[in-house]
Each structure stands twice: as structure tokens, then as C-alpha cells.
Image: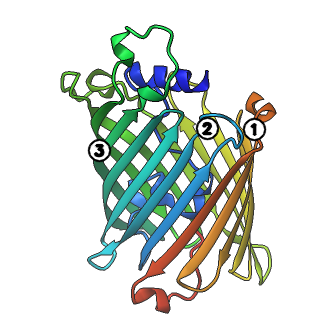
Amino acid sequence: MQARLYCFFFLSHLNAQQDVMVSQYMFNGILLNPAYSGSHKYFSSSLLHRAQWLNFEGAPQTSILAIDGPLNNQKMGVGLLVSHDIIGVTNQTDVYGNYSYFLKLGPGKLGFGIKAGVSNYVANVDQLVVWDTDDALFIGTKKSALLAKFGFGAYYFTERWYAGFSIPSMLAYDPEHNFNLSLESSSDIRKHDYLTAGYVFDANEKLKIKPSFLIKYQTAAPTEVDINLTAMYIETISLGVSYRTNDAISIMAEYQANKRFRVGYAYDITTSKIRHYSSGTHEIMLGYDFGKDIIKTKTPRFF
């Protein structure tokens, strides 16, 4: 039943999950905002895998590779984001390139970023059990679609706080539609707006506290809010908790092994009705920072 449901959404003009979402985005802002790309003095990479709603048939699984870094004395930044998302009998592969430009403004910097790339959607219809075997929609082994997408973001940051706004899919083009600058006219993708902010303050000499939030808005769906609180001990171990409205509570941990390498883990406790059929969500992240400026950095990243 679950597989039939996901395939129906996919084949009905791709109205299924459109933007990949994970719990550990606060440790790497490129997952939300292209303007974050190159906001540090060094290049950064991360590899993340998320297994959602364990023991739930057809549940999402997501893998993401992200790399970003500065150019031209931190006046510009570039980034690469590759993700693969599996839901039931459907899968989605995204490949995006990011470009950002930074302006000195007050005590911090203001960055503007754009992203461009493609999303490839595939439905393995041969894995379905169907009642109407003559329905042309289910004839064959696979159904696929390739969409071009473009996004935008703005990001302001200082040493202690940040704020950002992004539209990951601001424009999209589906060959089955007429080209139009209106996202809803040129594709079946719907615009999602992200607003995020966070602040780091010293609790004492060894402990830093970082509260943050993320607001996700889409006109046809309820607004979703993430409220996060992270504590960093001796700039090495981070422990955090996050509440996502109508969805889950996340418990997170990150270990900064050295200036270059870090590892993170998150466990989501589902609060929706799916909790009766799932044992939660696991997410693991590996990060590696590189470049000569990483050695000169006195402290690890806060965001």
C-alpha cells in the first residue's frame, strides 16, 4: 500500500517530497542556503546519510555529499551539493552548483548566493502490485523525469550570530510545461521559503551555548518550525536537541576530533502517528575541512 501511494504522487506530476530535509543542517548551512557557500576561510566537505522511519515500509533514505569553500580572499564562494533520496519505489537525484558573493557590512558579512542544477526523478513501476494491468501509467519498468532548478539565498554572519533566508527552488523547468518565470507555471514544483538564525554565547570558559531556529513556509502546507539548542564543551563535543513541529524531536551529537575532521549523529523521535509503526530515524554525518587556512584557525566552527 505504501509503495502504491508514493508512486501515485510521483506519477501525478512529481507532487511528492521536493526538498531534501535532514536534522543536522545547523552543522552545515550549505544544505539550506547557497549563500553559505564559502563563508569560512577554508574548504569544507561533509557526507551524510539519513535512514528515516525505521521498520516503516517504503520509508525515505537520503544520502548527501556537500563541498564548499572561498575564492578571491573570501569575497566569493563556491559549492557543490549532490543528494540521492529514495521514497518507496521512487528515487530523486539532485546535483547543484552554488555561487556566492560577500560584502563587508558592519561587524560581519552579507552574502548573496545562487544555485543551479538538475533533479532526476525515477519511479520503478515494475515493483508495484497494480489492479489495472492495462493502465498505460503503469506499463513498463521505469518512469523518469529530468528538471532544471534554480535557487537563491541571502546570509549575514558575524563571529557570534547569523541569519539567513533562502528559496532552494525559486525557478524550475519541466519539459512537459511551457517555460515561464513563475515556478508553478513552468513545473509542478512548489516554492518553499526558509528563514533561519542562531546565536553563540559563552556560558563559562569551557561551555558555549547556541540556540537557533528554522522556519519552513509553503503556501499550501502548514508552516513548520524547528527550535534547536546546542551546547559545545571545550570546543570539541557538541550535544543538542531540536523540536520540529508536528514531526519529531531530534537528539544530536557532534565530535570535533581535530581541526580537520568531525563526526555527527542524530536520532529523531517521531511525534506524529507514524511513531506507532516506526522505531525512529538515524542520521550520521562525516565532515572534513581542508586548505592551509584551517591550520591558522584558532577555534572550530560554531556554524
Q: Of the two numbered discs 3 and 1 on the same chain, state the one appearing first in sequence.
A: 3
- Do residues under tags 2 and 1 come within 8 Å of each other at their CB atoms? yes
Name the residue nearer the viewer: 273 or 140.
140
Residue at 35%, 63% (x, y): give it. 79
Q: Could you say whether the residue bearing mark 1 is in a helix, strand or loop?
A: loop
Which residue in the protein does label 1 denote? 278
Q: Is residue 99 above or below residue 213?
A: below
Q: Residue 263 in the image: x percent, y percent?
A: 62, 72
Residue at 33%, 41% (x, y): give it. 119
Residue neighbourhood size for the residue with mark 2, other residues' Cα within 10 Å, grouped as few (<14), some (14–19), many (≥20): some
Q: Could you say whether the residue bearing mark 2 is in a helix, strand or loop?
A: loop
For residue 25, say whether it is visible: no
Q: Of the two numbered discs 2 and 3 on the same chain, state the one appearing first in sequence.
A: 2
User: Looking at the image, what colour scheme do you see?
Assistant: rainbow
Q: Residue 161 in the image: x percent, y percent?
A: 58, 64
Disc 1 marks which amino acid?
Ser
